[in-house]
Image (tube, rainbow, N blue to C red):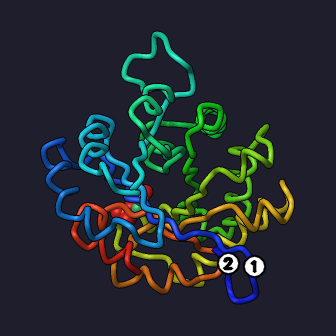
Amino acid sequence: MTDDQGEMMRRRIVAANWKMNMTSDEAGAFINTIREGINGKEAEVHIIPPFVDIAVVKDALKGTDILVGAQNMYYEDKGAFTGEISADMLTCLGVHSVVIGHSERRNIFSEDDEMINLKVKKALEKGLVPILCCGESLDTREAGKVSEWINAQIESAFSGISAQDAVKCIIAYEPIWAIGTGKVATTDQAQEVCLLIREKIKELYGSETAEDIHILYGGSVKADNCKELFECPDIDGGLVGGASLKPEFVDIVNA
Ligand code: 13P
């Protein structure tokens, strides 16, 4: 896609992170209600259900251009890792993308930067698109340390990754204080951090990679606030939690 000046434009991406919601029965029924509304749109749509719903969702999306993602994966290929899911298990099901480093994984399940880096590398090695999450807590924001925090998260997540691979990643900026709270970041706050992330990518990989990489905003994205967020120059779409479980998701994709 190109703009009026013939410059390459980044495609919009809207990703639905269902988190731990929807049984497989519910998942199939829900996809049937939103399928037509989200198919064939300009935006690239990713539905990211719990692992056990992936096969049902894939099946319900047959014949559409909607992509399926996973919410997590482990960085080892196989072995004695009870309860974990490998990249090969995901690709075998036709999964396209995988969320890595969501703040709920970092905070509730103690995933650290080193583990997140290993997961990003493994996902890339196996041909999955990592949706790498970053974001600061309210304390970090109030202490005026947002840029320091985000830069460190990005630097560590991309450590040892080539520019050729980095550009395949999608980055999601999700301020922790805006997740599930109804407290959306202002467009200025969201744009400011997404620009900061793009500048960090430029520092690490140069301007071409920075111009091409997709950066999403996540945190209380709803049908009534998504348009102005998605219009910001450095925000290429959204990672949607709560609102992706409702028919409202169709309106977000259409925005
Ligand atoms: P909410 O949209 O429910 O705030 O969740 C955002 C999120 O964490 C998506 O990954």
Residue at horizontal 34 percent and vertical 73 percent from the top:
182
The image quadrant that residue 23 belongs to is top left
Q: Amino acid at mark 1?
A: Glu
Instruction: Using the image as rendered, state which of residue 63 and residue 178 is in the foreground.
Output: 63
Q: Please give left or right for residue 229 compared with residue 45 in the image.
A: right
Q: Which type of secondary structure does the marked residue at label 2 adopt?
A: loop
Instruction: Using the image as rendered, state which of residue 158 and residue 212 is in the foreground.
Output: 212
Q: Which mark is residue 120?
A: none
List x then y, in percent, for residue 4: 69, 89
Q: Is residue 62 above or below residue 37?
A: above
In terms of image quarters, where does ligand 1 lie? bottom left
Residue at horizontal 59 percent and vertical 84 percent from the top:
188
Quadrant for the N terminus in the image: bottom right
Q: Which type of secondary structure does the marked residue at label 1 adopt?
A: loop
Real-space CA distance between mark 2 and mark 1, rounded to the nearest whole angstrom: 5 Å
Label 2: few (<14), some or many (≥20) within 10 Å? few
Label 1: few (<14), some or many (≥20) within 10 Å? few
Q: Is residue 18 above or below residue 42?
A: above
List x then y, in percent, for residue 185: 49, 77
List x then y, in percent, for residue 180: 35, 64
Instruction: Using the image as rendered, state which of residue 4 and residue 245 is in the foreground.
Output: 4
Residue hosting label 1: 7
Residue hosting label 2: 2
The image quadrant that residue 146 belongs to is bottom right
Q: Is residue 143 above or below residue 204?
A: below
List x then y, in percent, for residue 89: 43, 26
* Residue closest to the far top: 80
Residue at horizontal 55 percent and vertical 19 percent from the top:
77
Q: Amino acid at mark 2?
A: Thr
Circles 2 and 1 in contact, beta carbons < 8 Å:
yes
Residue at horizontal 27 percent and vertical 34 percent from the top:
52
Q: Earlier in the sequence, mark 2 or mark 1?
A: 2
